[in-house]
Image (cartoon, grey):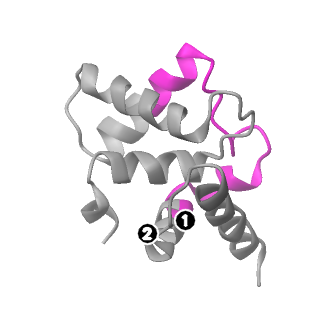
Amino acid sequence: MGKRDDLIAKYADDLKNKCGMTPDMDLLTKVTIGCGPSIYNDDASTVASSQESELETVKNNFLMKKLGLADGPNLMDGINAVIETYGKSERNKYRAVFYYMLVKHFGKESVYS
């Protein structure tokens, strides 16, 4: 297994044990690949959920640009729901897991098919 496979296994573990979800491994793999090289960088591989600017970036670059969602209060509601599911006290919120849960939350799996 390569480094990416190891990370995907770690993300699947987070989804199962921290978020109480059974991951769709095919979708998780595609979301992880979509994150690009950021998954290998300690800082970029996680979402700083307590920083407003970071959440705005997730909203603008991922939800609006990547998933094609229209701007509105429902986007931040979705982000907050993911933070709640992942656990506010969880320091390392992996970007791939965060994005995976957003894709599921907004029902945008078709973007990755």
Query: For the view shown, which residue lies furthest in the left direction?
Result: 70
Per the rendered image, the range of residues in magenta is: 32-58
Q: Position of residue 52 (x, y in %)?
A: 54, 14
SS of the residue at dot 2? helix
User: Which residue lies under the disc numbered 1?
Assistant: 33
Residue 8 is covered by the magenta coloring: no
Residue drawn 52% across the image and 39% down it: 85
Q: Position of residue 70 (x, y in %)?
A: 19, 32
Side (left or right) of 3 relative to 65? right
- The Cα atoms of the two marked residues, 1 and 2, are separated by 10 Å
Residue drawn 51% across the image and 74% down it: 25
* Disc 1 + disc 2, Cβ < 8 Å: no
Per the rendering, the mark at residue 27 is 2
In the figure, 38 relative to 25: above or below? above
Q: Amino acid at mark 1?
A: Ile
Residue drawn 26% across the image and 53% down it: 107
Q: Amino acid at mark 2?
A: Leu
**Figure quadrant of the C terminus:** bottom left
Residue 45 is covered by the magenta coloring: yes
Per the rendering, the mark at residue 96 is none
In-front residue for pair 105/69: 105
In-front residue for pair 35/46: 46
In the figure, 65 relative to 54: above or below? below
Residue drawn 48% across the image and 27% down it: 57
SS of the residue at dot 1? helix
